């Protein structure tokens, strides 16, 4: 099946979109019902749009930018969803709405912002995925912070995405373009004495960017900064063998890794087709060998969301759209708790592979059976599981062929 047909099918599945240009701040009035506010620091290497309604476009900038943003969240809403306005300007009583935008011109201003918004010294760095506008990532992080109940200072790193299903190659190259910018942002954050620990939450193609930035840091310093304690990869759009090399080459000690996977992820199925029918990390069955044993040996926790149901027709954003899963991130994973307790109760249930043992969280059995999908939904033939054990364990300082 041609690539464009696969992407066109995904476009139909993904829905009709929403109004663009929501970044112009709106005022809260005395008549506005009580809303919740989420304040975040946004770092980007996108190009400024020159339009206050969008702030930044999808093109690349060699200069990074910092912005202080506040988002208002309406009181009546379903957890796991973003209430996009049907018309502009947004109505804070019913819609997500930006209520403050302030550009920060220096690193010192960024540090001052963080000191003013301390949450116990904990920082969350969110990295969005493929096909995201600047405003998409801002509203998604606001939703995650609000619905998870996390106690951390939110920092968004948004990289240059053209926000088009037909710009997959451009977006992928943009993640490569952004590696050093993200690494620098993580270094600045790590060097702040007020920051005690950092959790990285990356989604989809953003997981590639996160892994590459951490790999670069590891190669420069021999290991990842110790303040970066937890890395959560949601629906990782990474070739599984490449992930294994990235993981090893970031050195030791490494952060604690948790990955969210789902075998019914249609977006990753399309990505696998586009990239030569290569298995994506986010689409594996972690209870299957050799994945189960190799994940155990590497100390990586895999959480299988295949049987979790959300309103996402692509099954690609379950980590944020399932109220139970997003709370799991904020209340347990971010504070370093392992999912080995029997008192976790999730309505749909998830299977967690920890220490080589498949544990059931909720009422669903640990065995995951992927439902048959048609060629559009899952345009690849499932291959034998890839053995990544050698890649996960080899010495990262591999010698040149000429030596």
Image (tube, grey):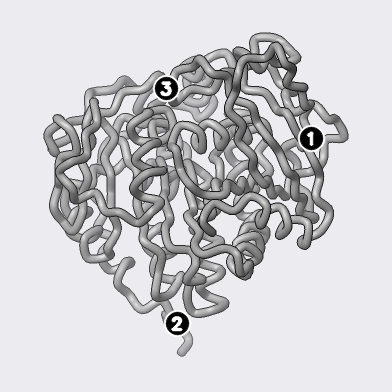
Image quarter in which the N terminus is found? top left
Q: CA distance from mark 1 to mark 2?
A: 48 Å
**Observer-nearest residue: 305 or 328?**
328
Q: Quadrant of residue 193?
A: bottom right
Kindly indicate whether the residue at mark 2 contacts the one at mark 1 (C-beta within 8 angstroms).
Answer: no
SS of the residue under disc 3: loop
Q: Residue at x 31, y 36 (%)?
A: 262
Q: Does the rendering let one see residue 166?
A: no
Report x, y in % for residue 238. Answer: 43, 49
Residue hosting label 2: 401
Q: Which mark is residue 151?
A: none
Residue 59, x across and y down, in percent: 75, 41
**Quarter of the figure with residue 268:** top left
282 is higher (above) or lower (below) than 87: below
Place residue 312 in its image quadrant.
top left
Q: Which one is nearer the viewer's eye here, 263 or 188? A: 188
Dot 1 falls on a residue whose secondary structure is: loop
Q: Position of residue 48 (x, y in %)?
A: 82, 40
**Distance between the alpha carbons at the discs numbered 2 and 3:** 47 Å
Q: Quick one: label 2 or label 3, which is nearer the N terminus?
A: 3
Q: Secondary structure at mark 2?
A: loop
Q: Which residue is mark 1?
A: 55
Q: Nearer the viewer, mark 1 or mark 2?
A: 1
Which residue position is annotated with label 3?
Answer: 312
Q: Is residue 158 left or right of residue 126?
A: right
| In this rendering, position of residue 372 left or right of residue 375 | left
Q: Earlier in the sequence, mark 1 or mark 3?
A: 1
Q: Position of residue 219 (x, y in %)?
A: 52, 75
Q: Is residue 390 left or right of residue 226?
A: left
């Amino acid at each position: 099946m041609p690539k464009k047909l696969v992407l066109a099918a995904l476009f139909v599945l993904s829905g009709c979109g929403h109004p663009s240009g929501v970044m112009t701040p709106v005022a809260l009035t005395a008549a506005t019902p009580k809303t919740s506010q989420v304040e975040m620091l946004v770092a980007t290497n996108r190009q400024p749009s020159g339009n206050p309604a969008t702030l930044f476009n999808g093109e690349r900038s060699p200069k990074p930018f910092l912005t202080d943003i506040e988002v208002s969240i309406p009181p009546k809403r379903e957890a796991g969803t973003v209430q996009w306005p049907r018309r502009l300007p947004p109505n804070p009583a019913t819609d997500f709405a930006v209520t403050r935008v302030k550009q920060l011109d220096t690193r010192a201003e960024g540090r001052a912002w963080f000191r003013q918004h301390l949450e116990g010294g904990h920082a969350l760095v969110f990295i969005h995925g493929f096909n995201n506008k600047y405003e998409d990532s801002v509203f998604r992080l606001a939703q995650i912070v609000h619905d998870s109940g996390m106690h951390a200072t939110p920092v968004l790193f948004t990289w240059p995405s053209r926000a088009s299903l037909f710009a997959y190659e451009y977006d992928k190259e943009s993640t490569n373009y952004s590696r050093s910018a993200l690494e620098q942002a993580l270094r600045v954050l790590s060097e702040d004495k007020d920051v005690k620990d950092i959790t990285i939450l990356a989604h989809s193609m953003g997981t590639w960017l996160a892994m590459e930035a951490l790999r670069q840091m590891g190669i420069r310093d021999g290991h990842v900064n110790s303040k970066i304690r937890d890395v959560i990869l949601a629906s990782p759009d990474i070739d599984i063998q490449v992930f294994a090399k990235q993981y090893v080459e970031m050195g030791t000690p490494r952060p604690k890794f948790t990955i969210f996977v789902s075998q019914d992820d249609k977006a990753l199925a399309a990505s696998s087709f586009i990239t030569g029918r290569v298995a994506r990390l986010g689409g594996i069955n972690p209870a299957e060998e050799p994945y189960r044993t190799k994940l155990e040996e590497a100390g990586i926790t895999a959480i299988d969301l295949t049987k979790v149901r959300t309103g996402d027709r692509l099954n690609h954003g379950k980590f944020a759209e399932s109220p139970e899963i997003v709370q799991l991130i904020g209340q347990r994973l971010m504070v370093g708790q392992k999912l080995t307790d029997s008192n976790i109760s999730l309505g749909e249930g998830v299977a967690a592979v920890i220490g080589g043992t498949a544990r059931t969280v909720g009422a669903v059995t640990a065995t995951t059976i992927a439902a048959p999908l048609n060629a559009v939904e899952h345009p690849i033939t499932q291959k034998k599981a890839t053995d990544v054990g050698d890649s996960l364990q080899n010495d990262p300082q591999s010698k040149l062929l000429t030596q």
